[in-house]
Image: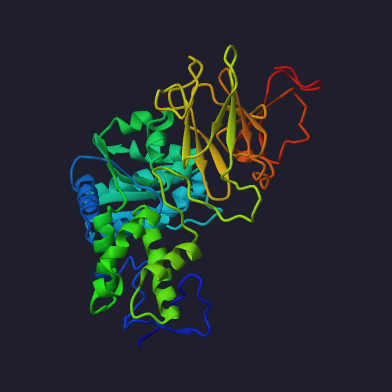
Amino acid sequence: MASFPGWQPGGVRLVSAQVTIPFGLSAPPFTERCNDDAFFFPGDQYLRALEFMGAVLWTRTQIGVITAEEGCGKSQVIRRFMAALDERVLCAEVHRPDLTAREFLDDVLRQFGVVLDATDRTDRRRLLERLLGHQMGLGRICLVVVEKPQVMDPLVLDEIKALAEIAVGGTRALKLLLLGQPLLNHVVDSRRMGQLMKNGATRFHLPALSEDQVSAYVAHRLRAAAAADPDQLMPYTLMPKVHLYTGGVPAVVNRLCTQALACAAVRGDAAVTMQALDEAIDTVGLQPRGSGAVPAASTEAGAPSILDATLLLATQGTADRDIPLVRSRALIGRSELADVRIDSVFVSRYHALIVREPTHDLLIDLGSTNGVLVNSRRVLRHVLRHRDLVQIGPARVTYLNPAATGVAGPDPGQTIYLARPGLVSPEQPAGATVLAFGRVAGDPPG
């Protein structure tokens, strides 16, 4: 048996730094190996995704939007694409969703070869504009890849839009690839980004693997790890169950198959059996996956789960409605496509989004006309807490989730406080913006 440092199959305790890989494999077959060509699965959707990105880069298209559910391989595809680029392309990849607007610009500049000190007061956007113009003059293409823009600070989205509008001689100077979960479509269709997306943007959705593809994917990974007979080691008869419990999401397939191999090795089996697979499913904690369902979270028996959330919608003239949050995202707006539909002229078609994460629910204003108020304060983004009152036009939406108690207050950088002159709310965090009208006693006139 070959040894490979650091392999830790889920649920199996390491006894030393060196772990012996069973079944004669040369390497762990189901780890993320983005830079290893042998482990890249050439499924039809991945080849089409690469073709789509190439079309964005080498045609007049300026912006490409790629969506996929979490774990479907967006990052692996983009890294394979970027690895094939040559000196004709200057590329920056932004994958941290928690960046501020200035940090975003600094990150792009750094990857383009310009490093600024934190105390440097140079106008970052103007510097990028000059840099893009210079690179165009040299015949180079500048590309910025942004991962998870759907959960980025709205001010970062404004910077992305501003950069995309930079033109030299009537030609846009920057190419953009935006990668995220399907709710990214609502963000790019919002008022904040809508005008930008009308100018030569195309979209591609990367689906999960079908049942047949799961079988081919597992065999491909095992073959890349030097399995003599992949079908004998993990028989194709197991694949319908693997697909049922993973939904065809490659990241979940990797976790389950890693655990199944570990369980078979512990049992002393020569191959993965149905019993080993069932044990792995229980160990990983998987349930049959339905379309759009939020992944199950592990909680103690009887304890409230962050996923057990409900919206209480109250509008004048209609009965109150309970709306359980059962999907990974919830769109609020006037559109017929909205999960929480509010039929009012004071509500935008795509007004706000609730993004469901394993540990919290995030409310995002999609650049609406009249804004979003949480507990009487206007916010652009806000981590929801139990009994938060969200005001959207004439509707009052109460967020009910006893498990959502861990966040102390909204982000002061994204909250607007309306106050009387000279009055500071005791809840107002340091550095928050205060809009006041009138004049404080003692101020000079005018």
- Image quarter of residue 424: top right
Residue 382: x, y in percent? 59, 38
Residue 276 appears in view: yes
- Residue 81 in the image: above or below residue 353: below
Query: Which residue is pictured at 23% across the width and 79% down the height?
Result: 228
Query: Which residue is pictured at 28% across the width and 32% down the height?
Result: 199
Furthest-right residue in view? 442
Query: Which residue is pictured at 35% across the width and 60% down the height?
Result: 242
Residue 224 appears in view: no
Image quarter where the N terminus lies is bottom left
Instruction: Check the image and tell me how it is coloured.
Output: rainbow
Q: Nearer the viewer, residue 96 or 350?
A: 350
- Residue 237 in the image: above or below residue 56: below
Furthest-bottom residue in view? 1
Q: Nearer the viewer, residue 253 or 343?
A: 253
Q: Nearer the viewer, residue 31 or 101?
A: 31
Compared across the picture, whether 203 is left or right of 7 comes to left
Residue 323: x, y in percent? 54, 30
Residue 415: x, y in percent? 62, 34
Query: Which residue is pictured at 50% across the width and 44% down the height?
Result: 101
- Residue 348 in the image: above or below residue 300: above
- Image quarter of residue 311: top right
Compared across the picture, whether 289 is left or right of 375 comes to left
Residue 235: x, y in percent? 28, 69
Q: Tell how many labels.
A: 0
Furthest-front residue in view? 275
Q: Nearer the viewer, residue 222 or 290?
A: 290
Image quarter where the C terminus lies is top right
